[in-house]
Amino acid sequence: MKDMIKSWRHVFKLDPEKDMSDDALDAVCMSGTDAIMVGGSTGVTYDNTVDLLSRVRRYELPCVQEVSDLEAVVPGFDLYLIPMVLNTQDHTWILEKHRQGIERYGYMIPWELVVAEGYIVLNPDAAVAKLTGAQTDISEESAAAYAQIADKLMQLPVVYLEYSGTFGSMDTVRRVRRSLEQAQLFYGGGITTPEQAAEAAASSDTVIVGNIVYDNLEQALATVTAVKRP
Ligand code: 1GP
């Protein structure tokens, strides 16, 4: 089951706190994207997550939850993606939330559906950077070193370069990709045009498209073709 992520090139990340009409959701789910990831840094609740999951479930594509709040973990997703923020000194976001989650949910955790993500957060203005106290002002070399901690020391299946809200440095993305041996590289942040989507796709394994879905649906849909073009 976990292996399904390996074939993903394009993923839409939907925020359960934000409204989306049935028509827009239909267009997103029928767009040819590889999966829907449900998650956000703030305002994610059990109720709004259940609601979005049940609406996406009418479609055939995989629907996964990126867990950011222990109160909002909802049964029934295809996979559970668990971020571990590597570039913070606050171990809340590397270990403590995770310990709490395991203590709370224990035997109920479907480990065969759990995928850990080594997050490297690089936009200082992003909500996730503020929340986690991420040290975003780091060199390419440091980003690549964090990526190798995830890839080689921790053997995490995913490294996620998170520029949420701004289009990142593709030089850094490529530098990080070259440093990886086994981990899959997710890139997310600030993709608003098909050109940016294509550039991110050329530099990473999987492109995550978020906010543009709410701001300009047509442009968002165009990113799918841009990424999947052979
Ligand atoms: C956010 O990486 C995703 O977690 C996507 O970012 O919303 O900026 O597209 P955007």
Image (cartoon, helix red, strand yellow):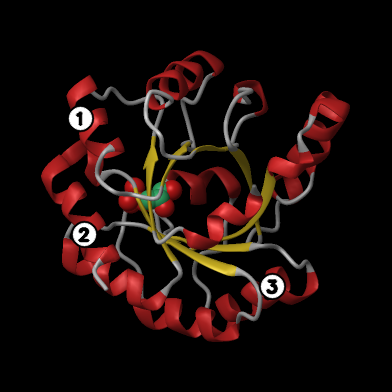
Q: Is residue 90 above or below residue 167?
A: above
Question: Is residue 80 positioned above or below 133 on the image?
Answer: above
Residue 9 appears at what percent x and percent y? 40, 61
In the picture, measured across the screen, residue 199 lies left or right of residue 116, that is left
| Crowd around label 1: few <14 · some 14–19 · many ≥20 (10 Å) | some
Q: Residues within 10 Å of mark 2 (few under 14, many from 20)?
A: some
92 vs 153: above or below: above
Alpha-carbon distance for marks 3 and 1? 37 Å
Q: Earlier in the sequence, mark 2 or mark 3?
A: 3
Tell me if 228 is positioned left or right of 68 in this view.
left
Q: Position of residue 130 (x, y in %)?
A: 50, 47
Foreground: disc 2 or disc 1: 2
Q: CA distance from mark 2 to mark 1?
A: 17 Å
Q: Is residue 110 above or below residue 174?
A: above
- CA separation in Å, label 2 and label 3: 29 Å
Q: Earlier in the sequence, mark 3 or mark 1?
A: 1
Mark 1 sits on what residue?
24
- The residue that appears at 78% across and 66% down in the rendered structure is 154
Dots 2 and 1: beta carbons under 8 Å? no
Q: Which mark is residue 160?
A: none
Most extreme residue toward the top is 47
Label 3 secondary element: helix
First in sequence, mark 2 or 1: give its number.
1
Image quadrant holding the C terminus, namely: bottom left
Mark 3 vs mark 1, foreground winner is: 1
The kind of residue tagged 3 is Asp
Residue 83: x %, y % from top left: 62, 49
Q: Residue at x 72, y 73 (%)?
A: 149
Q: For the point 73% across and 51% down, which residue is it?
A: 94
Please state if 180 lies on the left or on the right of 154 as rendered.
left
Mark 2 = which residue? 225
